[in-house]
Amino acid sequence: MNHYTFLCFCSVLLITSCIRESSRQFREIPADALKDKIAGGWAGKMIGVTYGAPTEFRAQGKTYEDSIHWIPGDVKGALWQDDIYVQLTFLMTMDRYGTDAPAKKTQELLAKAGYPLWHANVQARKNFFDSIFPPRSGHPDYNLHADDIDFQIEADYIGFMCPGMPVTANQLADKTGHIMNYGDGVYGGAFVAALYAEAFFENDIPKIIEKALLSIPAESDYAKIIRDVILLHHHFPSDWREAWNELEAKWGKVQICESGTSFNIDAKLNGAYIVMGLLYGEGDPLKTMEISTRCGQDSDCNPSNAMAVLGLITGFGGLPLEWQEAVKSIGDSLFIHTDYSFNKAVDQTLAYAGQLIIANGGEQTGETFRISIQDPQPLPFEESFPDLVFAKRVPVSDSSHWQPEGQWEKYGFTNTHASEPLKEKAIFSSHAGDKLTFRFQGTGVSLVGNWVKDGGIADIYIDETFQRRIDCFFNHAGQQHLNMDLFHITGLPAGIHTLQLEVKGEKCAESEGARVYISEAVVFNTAPKTSKTHRFSFQ
């Protein structure tokens, strides 16, 4: 390359760079205004979760119609809410390892935290101790709760520190979300974080929702159900209950986690209730929280997410004065299991927001942040359990499907009083070589049993082919778990299959015994889901 050509080349690069810079959009926000919005988001989270807390899962597959009693002073209950203290563990990971903290470190802190966990989170904890790390720890092959709500209710901190930066929020959500979730489970957290990222500079709620949708794949069920809520709001603009009925008919059936019940912990359905509250609430905080709460299911988490959006829009200073005072009164009180208070969470979130703003093309000049606004980009498409539907539950007492070999013993326990009949039944063995065979017709199966402090090791075979060694020991954070997914497999060819468990008579060093407890199996089939063929009444 001669000198003239080199100069021309450099000129082209400079011009291109200038064009890119000139086309980039920036928004300026004073540091105190940014802090006020972050505080509004955290406060909204706290207010919403305490508003809905008394109703949690009291309405399953139906709307909640009892009275709701909430006063601003109830916000102190947020100090004991897992919706908040779990994600503060994620924030603590950043404190130790920076904003690019490895997902494995986050999983480790979650696994070793001294508080109880459930669903996708507790499976991520179990996976850590079984040496199953992200992203496998949230993958549907290793986590039957991949589509559950866990990450959706714990992703707030990501959106709070990504003002106008949905792409950055997605990068953080993609990494953290795959610790415990996959597919729609990850998209739930990404969508919520995107709502927050957009709410810093937009106060039109329908526009915020539309822009947040651009952060998740349009072909995902999560995006489809949110689109359905928008459609239903258009057709029933003043009747959220009619919209709810239509939505329940299409999306309400439980297929995977807690299949065969009305208990729905699915991220996308509960995400739809967030959006219903936002659209039908029309910016009114009490109306927004009431509707998200009355939609039912996980009815403390959903108003919490919805109220956080409003808190970001208005800022802390825009909340009702009584609410501000209630939050301020506990501003330095620690959330349980953490060394974080509301005030510290706000300050740390602001600090990380500043770091992320600068790392992503923005700057801070004096007391003003200049933010390089990002155009949303969807996460890659992934689907946890395509066309997998619930078939039946088969208790271990059903001798037509189960065949024990060896020294298996019966096990049962009562609910509250010894005089009550057995609520749950199982069988157990700790004898090496004992076998248990389950014969079923379907394309998938989940083996259900107990994670306990005297749990032992077993090998699993499908159609006489070895699949995996499982360890039934669990004694973390004072928890043991009954009726858990010990092993599952999907994608089998349609037909008759056998699942066989062989007790090894072995245990890990921490276990007090080598027992393997089995209570039932859940059988799945492959078939089109109702949501894919359902049409609303007006279609």
Image (cartoon, rainbow, N blue to C red):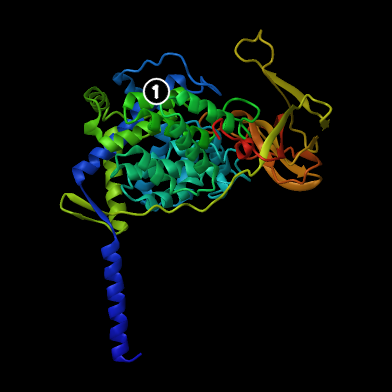
Percent position (x, y) of residue 185? 52, 41
Residue 393 lies in what quarter of the image? top right
186, above or below 85, in the image: below
Residue pictured at 32% horizontal, 41% vertical: 199
Q: How many marks?
A: 1
Q: What residue type is disc 1 on?
A: Glu
Report if residue 84 is visible in the image.
yes
Front position in the image: 43 or 467: 43
Percent position (x, y) of residue 335? 35, 30
| Relative to 104, 489 lies left or right | right
Q: Which image quarter holds the C terminus? A: top right
Q: Which image quarter holds the N terminus? A: bottom left
Percent position (x, y) of residue 358? 28, 56
Front position in the image: 241 or 454: 241
Q: Determine the residue located farthest toward the left in the rendered image.
A: 366
- The residue that label 1 is drawn on is 290
Q: Residues within 10 Å of mark 1 (few under 14, many from 20)?
A: many
Front position in the image: 165 or 445: 165
Percent position (x, y) of residue 250? 58, 32
Residue pictured at 32% horizontal, 45% vertical: 161
| Relative to 255, 28 lies left or right | left
Secondary structure of residue under mark 1: helix
